Amino acid sequence: MCASMVELGTEICPCGLGKPYSQCCEPFHQGKNHAETAEQLMRSRYTAYVKHLDEYLLRTWAESTRPVGMDVEEALSWQKLTVLKTKKGRQKDKKGWVTFCAEYQIGLERFKLVEKSEFKRDDNGHWVYVEGEFE
Ligand SMILES: [Zn+2]
């Protein structure tokens, strides 16, 4: 039996869950579905950074902290996401925190960023990103 269940040509979602993009973060990006947990939103936002989906990043940003526009660093390429810790952010919660490590590359140099992000539910009950704190 083939070790991989994923068909050739299927794009694996960059968020780290190993599922095809079309069954992972894409429905969130297309607005067909909403993240059920803070971690799901965090992963879908990471993928949006990978794909430069500025509109999604702004849409899932709390109004109080949302920037006017995204300042995309073209030279930077996101490599890997690892979720280190989550606190609350479940279906029944109104707030949540996700600590993650994101690896990125600029030129030949590779960097690591560890951030604790805060999420809350907006007026429609959808998870949004509030702010992050570097660790
Ligand atoms: Zn994903």
Image (cartoon, rainbow, N blue to C red):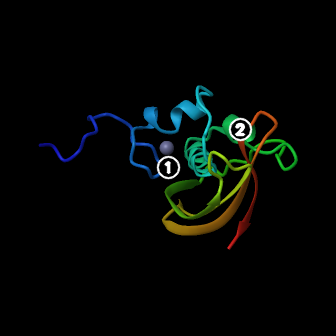
- What residue is pinned by disc 2? 126
Which element carries disc 2, helix, strand or loop?
Answer: loop
Q: Residue furthest left?
A: 1
Q: Is residue 40 above or below residue 76?
A: above
Quarter residue 57 falls in: top right
Q: Is residue 55 above or below residue 133?
A: above
Nearer to us of marks 1 and 2 is: 2
Quarter residue 102 falls in: bottom right
Q: Nearer the viewer, residue 3 or 36?
A: 36
- Disc 1: residue Cβ within 8 A of ligand 1's nearest atom: yes
Mark 2 or mark 1, which is nearer the start of the sequence?
A: 1
Q: Residue furthest bottom?
A: 135
Count neighbours of disc 2 (C-alpha within 10 A) and say few if under 14, some if 14 to 19, many if 20 or more.
some
Q: Position of residue 50 (x, y in %)?
A: 55, 47
Q: Residue furthest right?
A: 64
Which element carries disc 1, helix, strand or loop?
Answer: loop
What amino acid type should be assigned to the residue bearing mark 1?
Cys
Q: Residue at horizontal 69%, vertical 59%?
A: 117
Q: Position of residue 71 (x, y in %)?
A: 74, 48
Q: Is residue 107 above or below residue 14?
A: below
Q: Position of residue 100 (x, y in %)?
A: 58, 63
Q: Which mark is residue 15?
A: 1
What amino acid type should be assigned to the residue bearing mark 2?
His
Q: Quadrant of the C terminus?
A: bottom right
What is the C-alpha distance between the residues marked 1 and 2? 19 Å
Q: Residue at horizontal 25%, vertical 40%?
A: 5
Q: Position of residue 39 (x, y in %)?
A: 59, 52
Count neighbours of disc 1 (C-alpha within 10 A) and say few if under 14, some if 14 to 19, many if 20 or more.
many
Q: Residue at horizontal 67%, vertical 36%?
A: 56
